[in-house]
Image (cartoon, grey):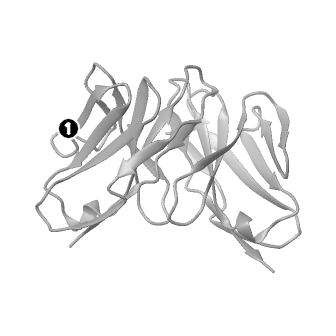
Amino acid sequence: SAVISQKPSRDICQRGTSLTIQCQVDSQVTMMFWYRQQPGQSLTLIATANQGSEATYESGFVIDKFPISRPNLTFSTLTVSNMSPEDSSIYLCSVELGEGGNQPQHFGDGTRLSIL
Amino acid sequence: GQNIDQPTEMTATEGAIVQINCTYQTSGFNGLFWYQQHAGEAPTFLSYNVLDGLEEKGRFSSFLSRSKGYSYLLLKELQMKDSASYLCAVRDRNYQLIWGAGTKLIIKP
């Protein structure tokens, strides 16, 4: 497996502000994923971030609201922009350590975000 | 649309056995994963099935029937630390993971 470090672990933010979440992996990975998980809910994929290309966003998520950077094979950031209380959630990054459909995703510890 | 169904919550007794079911309807199938998620923590990988049958890993086993679109996770000799949510996820034909909402398992002494 890999060590996946996510920062910050939690934050309380004011409405209208933006927060950037960092995800650092201790090995090089091609595919990184950003998820949102609201209390008692399933994981919802926000976007897939591959190094050297634009992130691919899922339906209902747009780059203006959730800009993503992927500058190298070990690091990615997700920004939650112009936050509202509806953005209060846990945000998780994950990676697949190899190629092939049998590879599980491994997750960072998550960022618990509360918007006032 | 694509859909994964799991019971919302289950309760079991310490030392007993519990089976958590997962049914899926997806566009294609390229494997099924089970994850464990303790409250306030990230999901951790438990098992993977791509062929029909039972995969055993210690106290945990996972079963798959592709023709029925059905899987279960079997937990034996339950311990209090097994109290967690258990997530079922299926890889569809595009190799995208489709996640179930999870089953919250409560273990009572």
Q: Chain of mark 1?
A: A
Residue positioned 32% across, 56% down in the render: A8
Q: Is residue A97 left or right of residue B108?
A: left
Does the image show residue A72? yes
Amino acid, disc 1: Ile
Rendering coords of residue A100 (x, y %) = 59, 20
Q: Is residue A13 left or right of residue A107?
A: left
Residue positioned 75% across, 32% down in the render: B66
Residue positioned 25% across, 24% down in the render: A54
Q: Quadrant of the C terminus of chain A?
A: bottom left
Rendering coords of residue B100 (x, y %) = 57, 50
Does the image show residue B2? no
Q: Is residue B13 left or right of residue A112?
A: right
Nearest the eye: A43 or B108: B108
Nearest the eye: A58 or A101: A101
For label 1, the residue is A63
Residue at the far bottom in the pictured view: B109
**Which quadrant holds residue B78?**
bottom right
Q: Secondary structure at mark 1?
A: loop
Q: Quadrant of the N terminus of chain A?
A: top right
Location of residue A63 with respect to B103 vertically, above or below: above
Rendering coords of residue B4 (x, y %) = 59, 47
